[in-house]
Image (cartoon, rainbow, N blue to C red):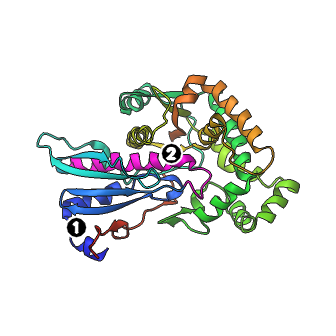
């Protein structure tokens, strides 16, 4: 890796330094870069479907890879380069690969969203309830490429979305399959983390964070607090209901047809990133809300996601609420969901692994 870093072209290095700030679920950063030349590289992806209940068929990781590819393309415009991307069809879906070639674009103007790549972040705390302006709504809708639209949840629908998130949180906080994920992705006592979510970014007060840390060390503690002491109540209030009520709007991004193939989710990730970066440019903060969509897909496909009795039934009821809230076709074709609003940038956030640790040597080079 050190040889790859030493040989890295300065322009390519700057592009990758920006691109690596793309969002990924739980800050997993499911990508590595194989440098083939000053303007050529391969992106090696991976997903966490084998050990993460949220990464159904790797689709959330594929969204993240799409966001990375869009970030790379945006960053390249700073140097009047166009990124040409092709996926290796022979690569397994769990480990997709993409060839990137950066070609001169003499008339390629720098994309202003490049300035937002490092500024974009997740804000899990309450935001302003000020409604979105007509200008903000227009700019956000225009940020989406052809084939994607945004469905807004404002006013009464905003409140219904907040309660939907609150009830979905109960689902994920009472199943051992999700607990295994949560205890591994949180860096307790931290304001920043290069490869996880720092506890101070969760959106809970220090006392609740301290109690959560102690409880989550053992599943038996989680079960006891959930059964006898309403253990999910405070985290759900602070991380889901109150922020869900305190925002300008919730939103659903949806495609013109239901996404099914890996390329559908890669494209959706690119659309999501442009929408998110545009929100950042408008001074808006955003928080993803993917859990309802993920469990709705489990229900739609008839897939069992937990050995705990009753979970499937709860998820089915929540999915019906989501479909009723936004309409059956939007729910079926949804690719991303979140909330946004005006407010300060987070004071704690996930960082990224340094670029040199994301570089891998081509086969035969060490």
Q: Is residue 83 above or below residue 226?
A: above
- Please provide percent x and percent y for residue 73: 28, 47
- Please provide percent x and percent y for residue 53: 62, 52
Q: Is residue 238 above or below residue 245?
A: below
* Quadrant of the image occupied by residue 301: top right
User: Distance between the Cα atoms at labels 1 and 2?
Assistant: 31 Å
Q: Quick one: SS at disc 1?
A: loop
**Which residue is at a point 37% across and 33% down the rendered structure image?**
143
Going from N to C along the chain, the mark reached first, 1 or 2, is 1
Q: On residue 59, which mark appears?
A: 2
Task: Give the labeled residue for mark 1.
Answer: 8
Residue extending farthest to the left is: 106
**Which residue is at a point 53% across and 63% down the rendered structure image?**
196
- Magenta portion: prevailing SS class: helix
Is residue 155 covered in magenta? no
Q: Nearer the viewer, residue 2 or 275?
A: 2
């Amino acid at each position: 890796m050190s040889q790859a870093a030493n040989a890295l072209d300065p322009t390519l290095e700057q592009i990758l330094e920006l691109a690596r700030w793309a969002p990924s679920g739980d800050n997993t950063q499911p990508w590595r870069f194989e440098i083939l030349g000053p303007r050529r590289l391969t992106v090696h992806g991976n997903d966490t479907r084998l050990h993460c209940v949220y990464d159904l068929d790797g689709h959330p990781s594929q969204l993240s890879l799409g966001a990375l590819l869009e970030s790379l393309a945006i960053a390249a415009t700073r140097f009047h380069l166009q990124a040409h991307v092709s996926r290796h069809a022979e690569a397994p879906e769990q480990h997709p690969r993409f060839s990137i070639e950066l070609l001169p674009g003499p008339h390629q103007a720098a994309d202003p969203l490049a300035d937002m790549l490092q500024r974009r972040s997740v804000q899990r705390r309450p935001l302003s309830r000020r409604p979105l302006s007509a200008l903000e709504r227009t700019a956000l809708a225009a940020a989406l490429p052809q084939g994607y639209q945004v469905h807004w949840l404002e006013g009464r629908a905003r409140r219904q979305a907040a309660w939907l998130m609150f009830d979905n949180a109960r689902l994920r906080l009472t199943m051992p399959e999700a607990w295994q994920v949560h205890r591994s992705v949180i860096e307790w006592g931290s304001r920043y983390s290069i490869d996880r979510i720092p506890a101070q970014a969760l959106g809970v007060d220090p006392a609740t964070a301290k109690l959560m840390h102690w409880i989550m060390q053992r599943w038996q503690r989680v079960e006891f607090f959930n059964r006898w002491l309403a253990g999910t109540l405070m985290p759900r209030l602070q991380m889901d209901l109150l922020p869900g009520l305190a925002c300008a709007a919730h939103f659903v991004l949806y495609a013109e047809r239901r996404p099914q193939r890996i390329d559908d989710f890669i494209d959706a990730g690119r659309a999501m990133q442009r929408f998110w970066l545009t929100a950042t440019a408008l001074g808006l903060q955003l928080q993803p809300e993917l859990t309802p969509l993920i469990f709705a897909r489990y229900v739609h496909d008839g897939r069992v996601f937990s050995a705990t009795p009753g979970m499937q039934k709860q998820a089915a009821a929540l999915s019906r609420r989501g479909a009723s809230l936004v309409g059956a076709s939007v729910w079926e074709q949804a690719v991303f969901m979140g909330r946004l609003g005006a407010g300060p940038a987070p004071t704690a956030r996930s960082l990224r692994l340094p670029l040199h640790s994301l570089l891998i040597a081509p086969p035969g080079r060490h």
